[in-house]
């Protein structure tokens, strides 16, 4: 019996040790979980403070329409680059915002890129000016604005600092300029709020407006009313007399725009190609008519020649018969 109690006591001791080990493990897990939570909170706090301190905000107002200076960089030669953001938060239709990325070198080169996802009538253009060793970022306001926040990112080199209070009027030598839209790069490329794209122009009035030459491997123009109707039986073909009189009066073919019209309004590729094809088809029909006339004239001439040859032979025979023997 004495031996039977020893294993029970041993098992009880082992259970106690195991329980203690489990408890210690749970405590260690809890401590690790607590430390991870603290580290996570510190990381979030660090990220938040970094984001806050990497941006400098000022509050300003605009006393009327026109060019206003919103930020400046007074490094040597005003050189540097960075990003400045304007936004408003008051009113029911806001926020409105405008992102401006800028660059200025040692001499006269400068660049500016603007973009905005908010359609607004507050501002229309942005530019980079230089005056007395200072570079200014300026915005052309369309109206007075009671409160606008100017935010300058720490991103960049010799970053610009925003003005506060009533914004001063703009001025100085313009180094770069862009029109405000969905996106604009200087005056090279503009994407307007309505989706029109301008290359070399800041005011595109069509889906794609290009102020310059275009080089492409192929251009496909889709158009309707292709002039196959010229070959229908009921088509009224203009006469050569009509075309001759029209050219004498107007100096160009009927339906074809004049040189003055082309210089003033340009030409639509699809429309002008259709008109040119129409004139080619009309000319083809006129040539076919003339060819038919020439064939008939040729046949008539051949017939007359044959008849004249018969008459000539008869006359020759008569002359031979009437000669004295």
Image (cartoon, helix red, strand yellow):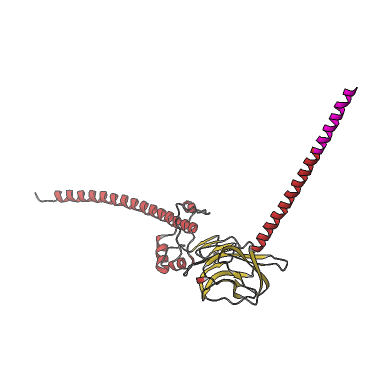
Q: In the rendered structure, does residue 7 fall within the stretch colored magenta? A: yes
Quarter of the view holding residue 180 = bottom right
Q: Where does residue 240 sit, x and y in percent of width and height?
A: 40, 60
Residue 293: x and y in percent read: 36, 53
Tell me which segment is drawn in magenta: 1-20
* Residue occupying the far left of the picture: 325
Residue drawn at (53%, 68%), measured in percent from left and top? 177
Residue shown at 42% from the left, 55% from the top: 280
Res 68 → quadrant:
bottom right
Residue 8 at x, y percent in the picture: 87, 28
Residue 106 shown in magenta: no
The residue drawn where x is 43% and y is 68% is 250
Camera-nearest residue between 222 and 308:
222
Q: Residue furthest right?
A: 1
Q: Is residue 102 visible?
A: no
Residue 272 visible to the viewer: yes
Along the line of sight, which residue is nearer the eye, 161 or 165? Answer: 161
Type of secondary structure dominating the magenta stretch: helix
Q: Nearer the viewer, residue 107 or 238?
A: 107
Question: Which residue is the extreme one toward the top?
Answer: 1
Determine whether, in the image, residue 225 is placed left or right of residue 252: right
Q: Nearer the viewer, residue 36 or 68?
A: 36
Q: Is residue 51 left or right of residue 229?
A: right
What is the total number of numbered labels drawn onto the structure image?
0
- Quadrant placement of the N terminus: top right
* Left or right: where 250 falls relative to 133: left
How far across and down, in percent of the image, does residue 140 sit?
Answer: 59, 72
């Amino acid at each position: 019996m004495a031996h039977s109690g020893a294993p029970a006591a041993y098992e009880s001791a082992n259970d106690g040790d195991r329980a203690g080990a489990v408890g210690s493990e749970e405590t260690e897990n809890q401590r690790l979980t607590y430390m991870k939570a603290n580290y996570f909170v510190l990381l979030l706090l660090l990220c938040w403070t970094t984001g806050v301190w990497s941006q400098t905000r000022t509050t300003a107002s605009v006393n009327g329409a026109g060019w206003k200076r919103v930020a400046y960089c007074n490094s040597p030669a005003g050189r540097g680059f960075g990003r400045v953001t304007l936004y408003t938060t008051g009113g029911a239709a806001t926020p409105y915002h405008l992102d401006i990325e800028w660059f200025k070198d040692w001499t006269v080169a400068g660049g500016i890129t603007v973009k905005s996802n908010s359609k607004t009538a507050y501002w229309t253009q942005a530019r980079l000016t230089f005056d007395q060793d200072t570079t200014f970022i300026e915005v052309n306001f369309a109206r007075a604005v009671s409160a606008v926040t100017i935010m300058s990112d720490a991103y960049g080199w010799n970053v610009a600092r925003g003005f506060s209070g009533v914004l001063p009027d703009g001025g100085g030598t313009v180094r770069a300029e862009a029109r405000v839209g969905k996106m604009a790069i200087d005056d090279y490329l503009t994407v307007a709020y309505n989706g029109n794209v301008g290359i070399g122009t800041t005011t595109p009035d069509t889906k794609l407006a290009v102020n310059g030459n275009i080089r492409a491997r192929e251009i496909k123009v889709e158009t309707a009313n292709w002039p196959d109707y010229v070959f229908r039986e009921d088509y009224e073909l203009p006469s050569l007399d009509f075309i001759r009189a029209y050219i004498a009066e107007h100096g160009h073919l009927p339906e074809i725009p004049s040189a003055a019209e082309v210089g003033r309004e340009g030409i639509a590729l699809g429309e002008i190609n259709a008109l040119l094809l129409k004139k080619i088809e009309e000319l083809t029909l006129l040539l076919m008519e003339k060819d038919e006339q020439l064939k008939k004239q040729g046949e008539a001439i051949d017939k007359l020649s044959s008849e004249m040859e018969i008459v000539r032979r008869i006359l020759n025979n008569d002359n031979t018969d009437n000669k004295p023997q």
